[in-house]
Amino acid sequence: MTSFQPVFAAMTVELSDNVIRALWAFGILVVGTMLGRILAGAVGRVVGARGSRQSAMVSRRLTFYGFLLVSLAASLRYAGVDPGVLLGTAGILTVAIGFASQTSASNLISGIFLLFERPFVVGDVITVGTTTGEVLAVDMLSVKLRTFDNLYVRVPNETLLKSQIANISHFPIRRVDVMLAVGYGEDMSEFRDALFAVAADNPNVLDEPTPMAIVDEFRESAVAVKFSAWAARENYLDAKSSLLEDIQSRIYDGRFRSPYPVRVMVSGDGPPRGSTAESPDESPTVSDVSRPGERDR
Amino acid sequence: MTVSIRLPAPWEPADLSGLDEFVRDFGPLSLSVRHGDGQWWIKRRHEGGGRPSGPRPDQDDDFVRLVSDEATTPALVFEPLLADRPIVARPEVPLGVVPGARVKLRVSTPLWVHVLTASGRHLVDMPTTVLKDTWFGPNTRVGELCYAARTSARVHLGEIARTPARAVTVVEIVNRTDEPFPVTRVKIPAKHLDLYVDRRGTFFTPSIRIVHEGSGDKETASIDVVPPEADGAVRVSEAREPADRGLFRSLGGLLG
């Protein structure tokens, strides 16, 4: 019994030393993490004051993760763990992890390409697929968007790299396109002049580039006209809404009527009563024109 | 503020003592001011009802209420300023400059009213005429937002109506080519120009000189001195942004 006491005492001392070492190593990691956060915040503020929100975010992340890695390495070394052993172990697991993390690796590499290519930066408004929103962050694996109805959307970087992205806020001005219809027989030049007058009176529509009114196509009951005017990026929605309001109140409620769909119906019994047509093939008179909603004879 | 002379009407300081409401016109702009208990109520109305770009306001008039930490003294100072953006002036009738000619065109642009308290605190800064926004640049990707204006581009100063709410800029265009040079628009770099007033109360800016040397936008531009026709001109306000070396390079795109 007595012979075990020195061994037991030695084991107790060794266990105490290991626990103390582990606690110290954990303390180094915690302190290193806290220092990393503080330093990353300071770097982010300095870079943000001189550059963009995107640069500040990238600098902050690089600083924090760099400091974290250094703290982890120091912590492991103090704990007596040889990092070389870890690397060896990691090598064995690499094949298995590689297959499992293909998507993550792809997102990570896509994120690096996006950072260099910069199709958008933090603060821009982009459309990806059916989602439109403000870019909140460009992270390692994904981009975070805030939609205009305040939803938080996470888009994987791989998706962004493979998809068509529309950066709505890249250029300072945007074109507002409005499709209109004018009845056959109306004075097209008068219609066009009325549209230009509406644009001239609208403070959100830019004087230049000058607005355009183009006859787009002949439809069944009306002539389609595409009216385009330019607005500053930040006034785009106000310009579009106010233009449509003004067109409705000053054009379609005034000189011009909004054209209705027209249907001409001819019965199989020959020309309508009162018609001067000698055969069923001749066009019927206006009184024979049937409009949607009216009962047929 | 660098006013050291007596400004012409309607720019002289105002004494609001005993007045419930103070009203003054600056060209098309009608300014109405009430004060008391450390607050200022300022209402503006533009003849013709024009309004700046942005969301449509609920009210027709533009009304602002300002609260101060000092008792309002019954006095206001009005500082004339040039626009806070460049102004693109389009001649009412398209014109061209004959080959080898050096011409001077007079372009007048509206002034801005900078309202300050007697102690020099800024209250409001507003245009006397509401101008539409426009884009000036080689394409829709590169350029800048400016104000749009129409000009008669007079050759003689006497042909321009002298109004207290507008400033005259002499634009000298030199055509060193063998072909007529069409001038469809001129960009006045208003925010980089100082403002002067002559003995007769007419506001002037330094002249702008543009030399056209060939096709492909080969123009050089520079800001010159106040024109000699501004007799006894004294500077009344400094440029909103000082002109630097980069400006002279970018001034090359003043004509369209």
Image (cartoon, coloured by chain):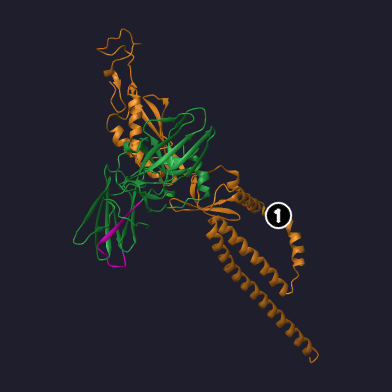
Location of mark 1 (residue)? A98
Quarter of the image for residue B76 reads: bottom left
Chain A rendered in what hue? orange
Task: Tell me if A286 is positioned left or right of B19 in this view.
Answer: right
User: Which residue range is magenta in the image?
Assistant: B68-80
Name the residue located 67 percent from the left edge and 52 percent from the top edge: A102
Who is closer to the viewer here, A231 or B246? B246
Who is closer to the viewer here, A259 or B205? B205
Task: Tell me if B184 is positioned left or right of A128 in this view.
Answer: left
Task: Tell me if A211 is positioned left or right of B34 in this view.
Answer: right
In the image, residue A47 sits, relative to residue B46, either above or below, namely below
Who is closer to the viewer here, A200 or A155? A200
Residue B73 counted in the magenta span: yes
Question: In green, which chain?
Answer: B
Whether residue A126 appears in this view of the structure is no
Report the number of discs: 1
Residue ranking furthest to the top: A278
